[in-house]
Amino acid sequence: MTEESASSLPSGATVVELEGKTVYIVGTAHVSAQSVQDVRAAVAAVRPDVVAIELCEPRYQGLVKKAAWRNTNLFQLIKQKKATFLLAQLALQAFYRRLGKQLEVEPGAEMLAGAACAEETGARLELIDRRIDLTLKRVWRHLGFWQRVKLFGTLAGALFSTDEIAAADVEALKKQDQLEALMGEMGKSFPEIKKRLIDERDVYLAQKLRAAPGTRIVAVVGAGHVPGMLKSIQADAPLAELESLPPPSRWSKIWPWLIPAAVVALIAWGFVHGGAERGVDSILIWVGVNGALAALGAALAWAHPLTILAAFVAAPITSLNPAIAAGWVAGLVEAWLRPPSVGDFEALPAAMENFRDFIRNPVVRILLVVVLANLGSSLGTFTAIPWIAAR
């Protein structure tokens, strides 16, 4: 690479010398017109044999194949317990699309620019990010119940927010000191999320670059990952642990069964020591509180009346069986009563640009029914048990 070419590298590019290869890491903002120009400038200056982008295969296909949503099987998705992860992913995409619309930039445009540059120059394209479903599962596995509630509140707040963000402010986020401050704040509120979503992927991205073929590599990654990547890119680190879910602990297998055992024991205690009236009262409390809060969750998602009824009936029963959840039952009923059309799936990208359209989309509504009915049932369980015990 000549001095003239080096001088044409964007200011956000960092050059790393590895054994047998040179890596040019271009830190970008995910919703930024300037970032697209930076990627094109870096590829033009370096003429790499490999362009690596911060995407996994599912996210890449989602960007290049807009019709991929058509093939989503909601029934299978609910049965496989993936509704929550998909809803979280859609919420984040909705937030980015709203910013992108405001700044007139397609979210992920800098990654697509990297892919396009690879095709134009004949370079090999490498997808170096960890699969999004695995990342979200690792995040979810390490969160407690109230942390999960807090996380959904944060995501909902981002969707409800109507504050506008200037393009200059987005570009300012590319400065390392501001990004470190941003990550620091995230770490205070959600240390486990930062560890799984940011820190682990810093290592993963760096190691995938170490293993990438070629001698000249342009890597397009979010600027927030660059400091962490630079710390780990010079040394080998095994990826097996980062590519797997930690096995559930013995306690995590036992405690879900302790709750139904406690409920049954409390109700039985009521019959033995308080008579039939006290026992029946305990059953009514369990059914009423658990069912009502699950039904309320479904109602908040604008579910069909029969879906709301299904949530009410299912919650007191499913709460006694950790293998089933009220939200799954309600979601399957809603999907059966009001199955989304192909047009509803095709409308998802546009719906993400407006909060009202987003929550009114039948696909999103079904996912919300699953999540909110499950949340209501969980709250009902934690409310009913102490109520019964206190009596």
Image (tube, rainbow, N blue to C red):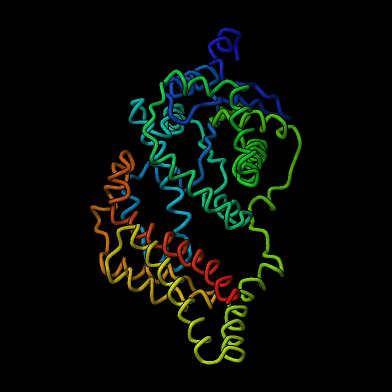
Residue 248, position in %: x, y? 67, 65
Q: Looking at the picture, tell me which residue is in the foreground, 217 or 290.
A: 290
Check the image and report above or below for 262 versus 72: below
Check the image and report above or below for 177 versus 353: above
Number of marks present in the image shown: 0
Q: Looking at the picture, tell me which residue is in the foreground, 288 or 359.
A: 288
In the image: residue 21, left or right of residue 289: right
Q: Residue furthest top?
A: 4
In the image: residue 371, left or right of residue 227: left
Residue 158, position in %: x, y? 44, 39
Residue at 48 percent across and 54 percent down: it is 85
Indicate the quadrant containing the C terminus: top left, top right, bottom left or bottom right. Answer: bottom right
Check the image and report above or below for 304 versus 362: below
Residue at 61 percent across and 80 percent down: it is 261
Residue 110, position in %: x, y? 45, 29
Residue 188, position in %: x, y? 64, 38
Quarter location, residue 204:
top right
Q: Looking at the picture, tell me which residue is in the foreground, 207 or 267.
A: 267
Indicate the quadrant containing the N terminus: top left, top right, bottom left or bottom right. Answer: top right
Residue at 59 percent across and 87 percent down: it is 268
Residue at 68 percent across and 48 percent down: it is 239
